[in-house]
Each structure stands twice: as structure tokens, then as C-alpha cells.
Amino acid sequence: MLLFVYYSTILNNTDISTLGKGKTPASTNNIETYNKETLGDEIRRLITTNTQLISDKIETEKAKVNLEANKTRLFNEKNSLVVKKKEFKAEIVALNTINTPIRNH
């Protein structure tokens, strides 16, 4: 409500007329004039839209943080698997060396 009063005060101190009785904006020389009720409705609609946009932005930021954490975790797991792969290859080579029969010619 405080925000509405603030905007109403600012708009009343400008050249925009808010005294009309109609519910639809009237256009005069490409300048729209609103009555106080319509202007109040429009301000509330914009505040609601702005609030939703801020909420969406916060959710997007949370998703980015989660994605970055998942990316880091998966990268660490990949590195761990690469190390295990190298260890298994070395173990296979060692086992193959032990199991290779020596031939005398």
C-alpha cells in the first residue's frame, strides 16, 4: 500500500491527469490519461508482474548455482574414474606380464 501511495503522489505531481471518472484511458496528443482507480489497478498489475519477475530471477539463480555444483561434482567423478581406469590398465599389464609364459628357443 505504501508503494501505491508513493506512486500516486509522484503521478499527482506530474502533468498526468488522474482526475477522470472513466475506466478506460483517454488518449490526447499521444498522452494517455487515467482515472485514479484505473491507474491504481495498473500500478498493482505492474507491481505483481515485477514481483513475479524477481521471483523468477531468484529461482533462475538458484538453478544456476545447483547446475554449477552438479557440474563440479560430475567433473570430480570423471577425474576419479579416469584415475581408476589408469590403475586398472596398469594392473592388467602387470597381471599379463606375470601370466605370460617364458619360451626358450
Image: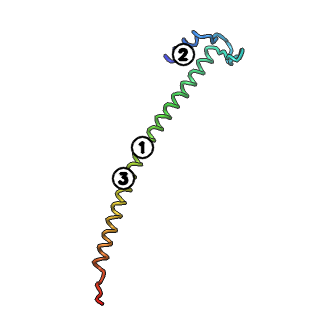
Q: How far from the left and from the top, in percent, is residue 11?
A: 58, 13
Q: Is residue 78 or residue 1 the one in the foreground?
A: 78
Q: How far from the left and from the top, in percent, is residue 5?
A: 52, 14
The dot on residue 66 is 1
Q: Is residue 80 or residue 54 the one in the foreground?
A: 80
**Mark in front: 2 vs 3:** 3
- Residue under the image location 38 percent in, 50 percent down: 73
Q: Callout 3, which amino acid?
A: Asn
Q: CA distance from mark 1 to mark 2?
A: 38 Å
Which residue is the site of mark 3? 76
Name the residue furthest bottom.
105
Q: Callout 2, which amino acid?
A: Tyr
Q: Secondary structure at mark 2?
A: helix
- Residue under the image location 68 percent in, 18 percent down: 25
Q: How far from the left and from the top, in percent, is residue 88?
A: 33, 67
Q: Secondary structure at mark 3?
A: helix
- Residue under the image location 54 percent in, 27 percent down: 48
Q: Callout 1, which amino acid?
A: Asn
- Sequence-wise first label, 2 or 3: 2
The dot on residue 7 is 2
Q: Secondary structure at mark 1?
A: helix
- Sequence-wise first label, 1 or 2: 2
